[in-house]
Amino acid sequence: MDNKNAIISVKNLVKKYDDFTAVQGISFDVYENEIFGLLGPNGAGKTTTLEIIETLREKTSGEILVNGYAVEKDAAKIKRIIGVQLQAAGYYPNLNLVELMELFSGLYGVDIKPMEMLEKVNLQDKAKAKYKALSGGQKQRFSIATTLINSPKIIFLDEPTTGLDPQARRNLWDLIIDIRNNGTTVVITTHYMDEAEQLCDRVAFVERGEIIALDTPDNLIDKLVSTGFERKKEVKKANLEDVFINLTGKEWREDN
Amino acid sequence: MSKPYNNTKATLALAKASFRSIMRSPSAVIFTLAFPLIFILVFGFLGNGGIKVKLAIAPGSDVQNPIIKALEQNTVVKLITDKEPAEIKAELEKGHIDALIEVKKNEGGQPAYLANVQYTSASIDKGSILKSVLNNLLYNLNSKDIKPSIAELHESTVQGRVYRTIDFILPGQLGFSLLSTGVFGTAFVFFGLRQNLVIKRFFATPVKRSSIVFGECLARIGFALLGAIFIILIGHFFFKFTLINGAATFLNMLLLSVIGLIVFMGFGFVVSGIAKSESTIPPISNIITLPQFLLSGTFFSIDAFPGWLQPISRALPLTYLNDAMRSVAFEGAGLWDVKHQILILIIWGIGIYAVAVKVFKWE
């Protein structure tokens, strides 16, 4: 990263629900134009943290600046410069993809050509299909397309590849890298460490509402190795997923 | 970020999306259009017969006589000539035929004819009607050549507008259509959008909450108005529904529809807020709509209800909408003439939206 401007800065973020504390004082910066990963087990507080930055949830305490705007004061301004893909989200019923795109362009107050947006995620053939009729990978690609409508500075992707087959997953990685290469900062959560290793410039490990490690994937691995850690099994030059991709082909599947 | 965010644009985009979605939703189309139309068709074709007394002529009876001639002219009496005696007897017992008449030439001279009428205890009401029809008819026939000694009766009828069944039924059906689309439609849409996290995704955009509500309401009003236009025009052109002042009456009815719908949507918001799951929406909605369907003068005038029931009827908002609609359509009342009804609707509206604001949930 040659550009180290923090576009998101989180300081001492705390989120308390009635009987438990989901996030207990975490701090991190996301730099402009990087892919930043939030990793950790289910219930660690990743989604809560993301949704507070996205201004969808109120924080209990702490300070969050997104592109210089404070979440508690300038939620409307923040919403205009971010794109959000939620872990679980629905789309207006009975509408096809083009109509949904028109709806979102109205909601964001921008003029876009729906077909161009769908082409970005290779869904132009599904323009007249309903969201419900899409496969898992297509749904995720459509969700990502809706995050790009307002040409955001930052997009948030919450477990975008969960439940996808290896082809769909790799295609999504290419898409995410493209988006970053076009100048957008990406914040992503995932359970797949190979994915984080491939995609992310830096990752933060979240555990029980706290950040327990934050660095580049390389540095984190080197640090572990330097403690004398060794894998039980010798690492080969390829893994089983490479075999899978090699056997079944890398191209897009009609339904992924 | 130079351009300021445009709330109107967002609202209209939502209204457009919602309208498309409603038009593709089978249940919305069925409740708003098909149901009321079916009732209108049924009642339209049932027509304006009013009361008909079925009077069988006994086989073998003389039919070339002034009594039968006069009965044939009578609009209340329907003569039945093609039945066997056994059939007539059976139908009399069931009340399917209301009476039997046999007319014979009097061989003895005066009077010229003898008429025997047999009534049935299975149809006493219509029997009495027939009795007075016959009395009147025979009196006229018998006194044709005689100057009355005490008083002579002169009857005339004021030429009024024909009040058809459709003039009563259509406003009621229109009101009910607005009630169902307002309550069911609004409840399902907002519950669905919340449950399926559509609203959550909306919240990640700069759209305002008020835009979401206004957009939805605009779409529903647009849809309900289309339905109302459709119902009124079909009623008017196919079943002679009276629009006394033509286009002005039509517009007044549409305005009333909007007022009614806005009130009914308030119930929908409340239902969407208190429903715990999708499957509890229909029962809760039915608790609101069914009593109004039955008690608000949709099918029968509430004057026909027993005394203890009438206060309940007079408390329901649909009663006042129906009432106002009928006055506007048939009597040519302006909106100012039905201000009393509109006022009560507005009071209902204020009350229900006060509740809606309390119970409505966004997530």
Image (cartoon, rainbow, N blue to C red):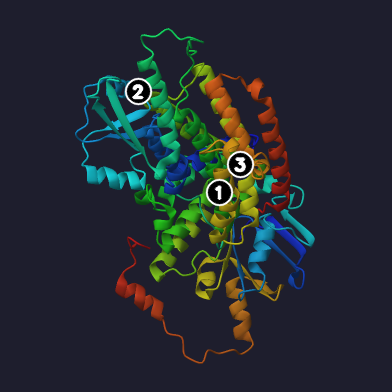
Instruction: Please give the residue where the numbered disc 1 appears in the rendered image.
Output: B290
Pick whichever of labels 2 and 3 is earlier in the sequence. Answer: 2
Instruction: Please give the residue where the numbered disc 2 appears in the rendered image.
Output: B74
Q: In which quarter of the view is residue B33 placed?
A: top left
Q: Tag 2: Cα neighbours inside 10 Å, few (<14), some, or many (≥20)?
A: few
Residue farthest to the right, as pictured: A61
Question: In 3D space, how far apart are the residues under numbered discs 2 and 3 (Cα atoms)?
Answer: 47 Å
Say what secondary structure mark 2 lies in: loop
* Callout 1 amino acid: Leu
Label 2 or label 3, whichever lies nearer to me, is 2
Residue under the image location 53 percent in, 38 percent down: B298
Which residue is nearer to you in this view: A213 or B96?
B96
Pick whichever of labels 1 and 3 is earlier in the sequence. Answer: 3
Instruction: Classify B70 as above or below B84.
Output: above
Question: In the image, are marks 1 and 2 on the same chain?
Answer: yes
Residue under the image location 52 percent in, 35 percent down: B172
Question: In 3D space, how far apart are the residues under numbered discs 1 and 2 (Cα atoms)?
Answer: 41 Å
